[in-house]
Structure formats: structure tokens, C-alpha cells
Amino acid sequence: MANRLFASMVAVLLAIIAIYYQELLDTFHPTPNLKVVDSARDITYLGSLSFAGIEHFQNIFYAEAPTGPRRFAAPVPTRPVKGSVIDATRAGAWCPQGTGDILPFTSSVTNISENCLSLRIARPPGTRKDAKLPVAVWIHGGGHALGSASDILYEPDGLVKLAAADGLPLVYVGINYRLGLFGFATSEALIERKDTNAGLRDQRAALEWVRDNIESFGGDPKRVTVVGQSVGASDIGLQLTAFGGDQDVPFQQAVMMSGGPGLNFNSQPDLVASNTAAISQQVGCGGGKDLQTLECLRGIPFEQLTNLSVTASRAARPPFGEAYFYPTIDDDFIQDRPSQLTRARKFTKGIPIIASWVTNDGAWYALPTTATDHEVLGSFGLWLHKLSESTKEKLLHLYPLDDFEHMVKSEHEGQISPQYYRAAQINRDIWFTCPVLDFTWQYVKNGGVGASQVRLYEFNQTRYTPVFDSMGVSMWGVAHLSDIPYLFYNDHLRAGADNSDPQLALARDFSRIIIQFVHGDPKGGGDRLQSWPPAFSNEPSKSSTGDVPSHISVRLFGGPHGSESATCSDSTTETDMEVMTYAEKALHWEKLFSRCAFLNGQQFREEAGV
């Protein structure tokens, strides 16, 4: 009995020590001598050192507080007075959004404010001002409804530390931008004043701040790679097609993780304008489209607007409120449907791209109880509400139920229907895989970059398996967000996630490839990038069947058979299948050519409004 009691006490003590240690990992402490001086502007930034030894500068404002007359308006760049000393030792507020917990491995949202247009910078210790290091800029996801660069999910220390250890140091920048109603409200008055899509304009302003100021932090403004996930990736595509491609973008490369601009459904402004007017009516400003209504909204307390808009968004688009306030055509920043802009060659050229999806990207868009054709179609019906009956029938035909029966695990027998996996796969392809394939293919095909400058990957591993098990959603598998901790080489994921050596080994491999891409330099592990074949043929005009290429090459990361590259063709025969590798068979099973040919075809694109 005494031994058991002692063992229990030891276990409790170890748990307390573990919690304390975790808090230390997340602690930043001001360092008197850690400062950056922008001598040209006579501005001093005070930084802090993380427990991992990485230098951080946080809550640096790139735009004035978007309050009062600046609410629902394009960002106004900050102009600190000469001699300013900016305290950048602590994280700033998140942009207005719903508060509370989101997922077990993400931060709880507690501190929100309109004065949120800030960025965070992380760099290796001792970085000199003249270091000229390449820069990786992170645009977070969250469905334009939630998120922040300060979320623990995006902790950059592992990435920065690994890059420096490999002799390929970089500067990391994460940006906050307006979300929800505050970032994407629209009306005739806003369109006339060119104040729409404020969240996208925030991103552009932050990238311009990096271009103009990052040199003081040891970064090279001519070697900036923008990295985004989910709508962060989609927004990179919208930045490339912004203003009809008539303006250069303030970055030189892009990594688009699980997202292309094609997931910007229903891009005409009608729906978002109606949602904006509904909130306006609730606060007593009327539902008008004129300047008077806009001025009234600018006088309402942000807490009231946040509560009402978040409640309305989540009620209409549960659970997070995605696709209630989002980017729309405004004849300025977004001049047409994104798929039309790429086909019309209205994009900024010369940007090498890595783009991707994860194996079960659509897993959480379908209810685990999905068991009928009607429920399969309903899994995306809230977002795609203009699909014709013929389109719905075609989707069911392209994704026959027989294809998914083998996916039901023995422990789920009798509980999970193959219809769930069918719905998850359709959602994955609609939201992520086919938009990614469409954007990158059209970008190459229409002269954006040479075929050798675009690569694709599919991620087939997750560190969240124990977390999903504890949440009761083990069927999610390699769900959306799964590749993020591998990118950031986070070795202490929370909530019981898998921090085992094999997972960290894969994280090192994947993170190193992205670091290599950011550097754009074949030294120090360049073979990893060089051995990754381009996504498309060198002669795209001869390798097309309508809206999809005739063959693609994809790098598969993780999975039971390890990482390898695979090439798949639309003319694959049964004989070809016999000599295929595991990765090639897996890619062939996804039927991307026939499915994306329809999802990227004119009929579906018009009905989806992408």
C-alpha cells in the first residue's frame, strides 16, 4: 500500500514538473541587450529570448489601429516618430473573433482587440543586421474567422533553430490580419471607397512592411517566401491575382499548404453584403448600403459587433463560422472569380510555388454519422448552395461508394459508414486538392512560371492520432492541419500529441526541405529539393486534357511505406498498375484526373462561384 502511495506521489510530482517545464518552454524573458536599431528611421525595437534561445520581437504594428474611421477601411501604415523605442517583448492581441477553446492543441482565445495589426519576428541568436538572411512569412489559416500568428500551433522556434543548425539560417515573420466582419464586410459604399477585403489588404500591408523594414532585423527583402495554410494558402493565390496581376507582389516565392484560391466559393459579393446588412440592422444602423450606414457601424463598440457577427457566423456555418464573411469580388483587389483570372493570365508572374494537400483534408467537414447519399451531398451543401441536380448526380457517380468500403476500420464496424469516407473525400477534393491542382496547373500553363518551378506534395502522416482518439474522432486520420507541426518542427506538441522519435525524424526531413526552398540555394541538403520532380511536364501545352494536366508528379510525405515521389497519368493501364510503387498506386486510387477534370471544369466552377 505504501509503495503504491509513494508511486502515486511520484507520478503527481512528475506531472507537476512536466507542466512547469512546458510553461518554461513557452516563456519569453526580456533581455536588456536584445534590441534592434533601425538607424535610417531612428527606431529601436526591444526583444525577448525564448527558453529555446531564439530571439523574438512581437506585437510590432505594421498598420495603425483600424478603429473609428479606419474600421472597415484599407490599412494605414504606421509611421513611428523618430527616437521611438518599441517594446516588442510580448505577444499582442488577436484580431476580433470568438473567444474560448478551439482544438486541444491550439491556444485558447482570450485577448482580442481591434488594435491587432501586428507581426512577430523570430531569428537565430546573434543575428547581425547585415546578415541578409532569407525570410519566411507565415499567413495563418482559420477560415477567415479565427486564428493568430501567436497561436501555439505556429510556434516558430523549432523551425528557426533547425535552420540555423543546418547552416541555413532564416528570419521568420508571422502576421495578424483582420477576420470575420471586420476583415471582409462588404457593401456598395465599401466597394465605391475601395475598402473591401480589408483582411487581404492587411496581408499586403504586412508584406510591404517586411519588404521595407526586415533588413534591420537581418533579413533580405529580396528573398521573401510567403507560407500559408488553408485560407492562408488561398489568400496567397488571391495576392498573386490581386488587381488583375497589374501590381508586383512583395515576395519572391510561395508555399501553399492545403489551399488554392479556388476554395473562395461564391465569390460574388451578394451573400457577404447580405450578412453585413443583417448585422447592421441588429445594431440599429439599418440595412442600407450607403455611407451613412457605414459611419453608423464605425461607431458601434467592437465587442458588440464581434459577439453578434461571431454568433451569426457560427449558427449559419457551424462550428467555426467559415464562409460567412470572406473575400469577394470588388472590382479592385479581386476583379473576377479566381479561376477566371488565372485562365486569363491576370496574375503576378515569376513566383516559384510549392503547393499541397493532406490525405484526409476533408475529414472534419463530414459528420461521422453520414450514412446516405443525401447526407453526403449535405456535407458541403451549406457552402455550395447553388449546385444543380445534374452536378450532384455527377459527384456521386465520380465517387462510387464501393471505392470507400475498404476504409472502414474494424473498430468502427457498424458505427461508421463508408458514406462518411466518401463525403470526406469529396470535401477534400472540392475544398483543397482540386483547387490546388487547378491553380498551379493554370499558373504554369498560362506562363506564370516554368514547369520546373512548381512542386506538389501530399502529406500522409499526423501527430494528432492520440488527440483525435481522445476526442472520439479517430476516423479523421490525417486531417486538416496535420502537416503544420512537421513544418515548424515542434518537438513538444500539447494535448497528448505524438512526439515520438519517428515523428520528429519525419518533421526534420520535411522542415529541411521547406528551409531549403526558402533559401533557394542547392548547398546543405539541396539534394532533397533537387530529387523532388516538378509537378508538370516541361511542355504544358502538349500535356493537357481540358482543365487538368495529362500527368502529375507528387511527393508523398509519411505513411506506412515512407516518403517518396510518385507520377500518375490519366492513361494509366492495368499493366502499368502491376509495376507501380505504393505511392503511385495510392495516387492513382485518388482518381484526380477524372474527379478534378469535373471539379475544375466550367460547369462546376460557375455553380461554385470560384
Image: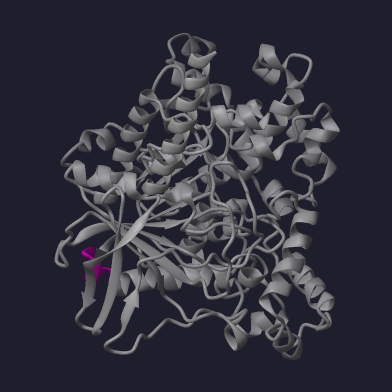
The answer to whether residue 321 is left or right of residue 387 is: left
- Residue 571 in view of the camera: no
The answer to whether residue 82 is left or right of residue 348 is: left
Instruction: Quadrant for residue 516, please give it.
Output: top left
Q: Which residue appears at 80% of the width and 51% of the height?
A: 385
- Where the N terminus falls, by quadrant? top right
| Residue 461 rendering spot, x and y as whole percentages | 48, 28
| Residue 610 rendering spot, x and y as whole percentages | 64, 55
Front residue of 23/539: it is: 23
Front residue of 455/442: it is: 455
Compared with 349, 269 (above or below) is below
Front residue of 338/63: it is: 63
The answer to whether residue 420 is left or right of residue 5 is: right
The answer to whether residue 436 is left or right of residue 218 is: right
Front residue of 56/344: it is: 56
Residue 273 falls within the magenta-colored stretch: no
Residues in magenta, as a range: 214-219
Q: Main secondary structure of the magenta part?
A: helix
Q: Which residue appears at 57% of the width and 84% of the height?
A: 70
